[in-house]
Image (cartoon, helix red, strand yellow):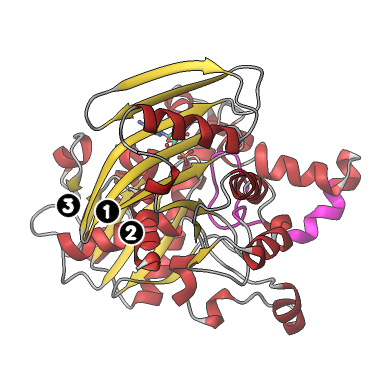
Amino acid sequence: MKKIFIMNLGTTSFKFKLYHVDGENMDVRASGEIESVGAEMSRWQYASADGHSQSGACPIPDHGAGFTLFLDILQRDGLLTGLQDLNAVGYKAVHGGSLSGTRLVDDELIAEMERVTPLAPAHNPIYLSAMKSIRRDYPELTQVARFETSFHATIPDCRTTYGVPYAWREEFGIRKYGFHGSSHEYIARTMKKLQPDARRVITCHLGGSSSICAILDGKSIATTMGATLQSGLFNNNRVGDFEPFCLPMLMEKLNCSMEDVLAILSKQSGLLGLSGVSNDLRLVLEAAEGGNAQAQLAVDTLIDNILGYIGMYIAYLGGLDALVFTGGIGLNSDVVRSRVCEKLAYLGLALDSDANNGRTDGCISTADSKVSVWRLKTDEESIVAQNVCSMLQ
Ligand code: ADP
């Protein structure tokens, strides 16, 4: 039996799950999270599968300190006898550039993550900082990274290549990588169990950050994000696909630097920028219902964007057997699901409106629908844990 500590890190957030893995069996024995890492006071909470829960507030200066906090708690709670009892820590790491898959955290991996940090500036530095501090404080501990790009390694070259000078791809790694790999992989594996004959699947991970993936026989063959997490779908506060030749004009009109324009495109655009209301779809939908035309346009643009990618992916897949919605929006917004699905009626796809309006995960299409539609909760950490275990074996 292996004990694996999986970390999912945000700029100021820290989430972990402790897995016990025994062959095919995986149990989450404890989980916890920290809010406001690096602030004067950070809040943390912890819960074990045995029902022990604790919470508190204290200064937690960085993600490495967050790991130490939970390591102590796990020992006091009897779930670990010491550091030697932990087989590995695993990271849901984001951009590994030319390195994909599941890999030991070593000098080569750190150097490559540093090299591609300009392509994932909000994510790679946090993971690098945690990896380095855990390496320093616990040098005997095995650290493993599963990159969010990994599931997309099967996408054909013609679909990961931009129409730019060939040398850019070779020398600088300017190509599409795709992200949210753990979520799309989880859905692909789940669909294999739920509907084994569904060879052509499209997964819509719609949330704070969104992407769509086309899956053929369990493998990713296309996804919406590119070299960075910024491109692809129109997101809550990110622009998604955009025209780079507008940048000089925007810099001139707004009298600001390239960095400033990029900050607007990545933080104040998407639903937020277009609606002028919020980056939360619930509030934008409410405003649209109240007659706010900009909010209505933002909702219509989001739906249209999702639909356009689904159409493209149906062409790549040569048809569609199953369509899956996940992520905060995918799971909770019956409006998004029904508006997208009504445009796919030409495929013989029919939503069961009671199931779509309900709260239960599972199939939400009618029994005679030609394409099944699902609403499934994703579980990214379990995919990281499974891959870390396979690598250790
Ligand atoms: P993250 O990508 O940060 O993990 P989530 O996948 O949890 O985020 O998704 C969060 C988003 O889900 C929120 O920004 C909100 O817009 C959206 N959301 C949650 N519930 C609903 C709902 N009932 N209707 C529409 N959108 C929702």
- Label 2 vs label 1, nearer the camera: 1
Q: Which residue is mark 2?
A: 386
Give me the residue at 51% from left, 46% from top: 301
Please tell me how crowded label 1 is: few (under 14), some (14-19), or many (20+) other residues with Cα within 10 Å.
Answer: some
Is residue 217 rendered to the left or right of residue 234?
A: left
Given residues 243 and 236, the one toward you in this image is 236
Tell me where residue 139 appears, x and y as whole percent: 58, 51
Q: Which residues are magenta?
A: 229-250
Q: Amino acid at mark 1?
A: Val
- Label 2 vs label 3, nearer the camera: 2
Residue 327 seen from this side: yes
Q: Which residue is mark 1?
A: 21
Asked if the stretch drawn in magenta spans residue 239, the answer is yes
Q: Is disc 2 in contact with disc 3, using a CB cutoff of under 8 Å?
A: no
- Label 3 vs label 1, nearer the camera: 1
Tell me where residue 333 appears, x and y as whole percent: 34, 37
First in residue order: circle 2 vs circle 3 = 3
- Label 3, label 1: how many angstroms apart (C-alpha)? 34 Å
Q: Is disc 2 in contact with disc 1, using a CB cutoff of under 8 Å?
A: yes
Q: Quadrant of residue 203?
A: bottom left
Asked if the stretch drawn in magenta spans residue 335, the answer is no
Q: Mark on residue 272?
A: none
Q: Mark on residue 365?
A: 3
Please tell me how crowded label 2 is: few (under 14), some (14-19), or many (20+) other residues with Cα within 10 Å.
Answer: some
Give me the residue at 40% from left, 76% from top: 316
Q: Amino acid at mark 2?
A: Gln
Residue 344 seen from this side: no
Q: Quadrant of residue 78?
A: top left
